[in-house]
Amino acid sequence: MRPKDEVLDRVSRLHRWNCEHVRTPYELAEREFTKSDDVADPRDALLQFMVAATPHDAVVAEILDKHDQIRENMVSWFESHFIGDDYGMLVEMIDNVPDTVSPVKAKPVYIQLPDGDKSMLMQAWRVSVPNSISSMSF
């Protein structure tokens, strides 16, 4: 493959991976996969994130085709996580998440979003894999 073709191929793959599912959250909401009033359960948000995050087309297709079944098979429990000597918090651990190799840690967070000339707080989820240096909020 010529160098120019390699660059174009790489850019094409990056564009597809980063932009292909930009409308997916809206489509999932229209199909009623996600329930906006269920802020206590991170499973829908986590599946929505995995659709956008996984590079595997087969995983995306499976999540979209079997969303409810996959959601019901996800198992969660709470663990105490201590911060320093005096402060602790409960973190939800979720297992059986598609395309992951260990349980995912989820905790509610709030993000500030613009709303005309004001701003509003929206509840979101921070998810991470235990013992990982990165985490993602959505």
Image (tube, rainbow, N blue to C red):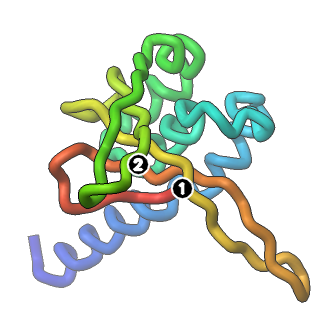
Query: Could you tell me residue 120's position as x and y percent?
Result: 80, 71
Q: Is residue 134 above or below residue 79?
A: below
Q: Residue at x 35, y 41 (%)?
A: 105
> Split into 4 quadrants, where in the image is the C terminus?
bottom right
Please name whichever residue, 111 or 99, is drawn nearer the observer in this view of the structure.
111
Q: Residue at x 62, y 47 (%)?
A: 24
Q: Residue at x 42, y 45 (%)?
A: 89
Circle 1 crowding by C-alpha within 10 Å: few under 14, some 14–19, many from 20:
some
Amino acid identity at mark 2: Val
Query: Could you tell me residue 124's position as x and y percent?
Result: 60, 53
Residue 127 - label:
2
Amino acid identity at mark 1: Phe
Q: CA distance from mark 2 to mark 1?
A: 8 Å
| Label 2 secondary element | strand
Q: Could you tell me if the residues under marks 2 and 1 are in contact, i.e. CB atoms within 8 Å?
A: yes
36 vs 19, left or right, is right
| Label 1 secondary element | loop
Looking at marks 2 and 1 on the same chain, the residue that comes earlier in the sequence is marked by 2
9 vs 74, left or right, is left
> Split into 4 quadrants, where in the image is the N terminus?
bottom left
Residue 95 - label:
none
Residue marked by disc 1: 138
Query: Could you tell me residue 113's position as x and y percent?
Result: 72, 73
* Residue reaching furthest to the front: 86
Please name whichever residue, 79 or 94, is drawn nearer the observer in this view of the structure.
79
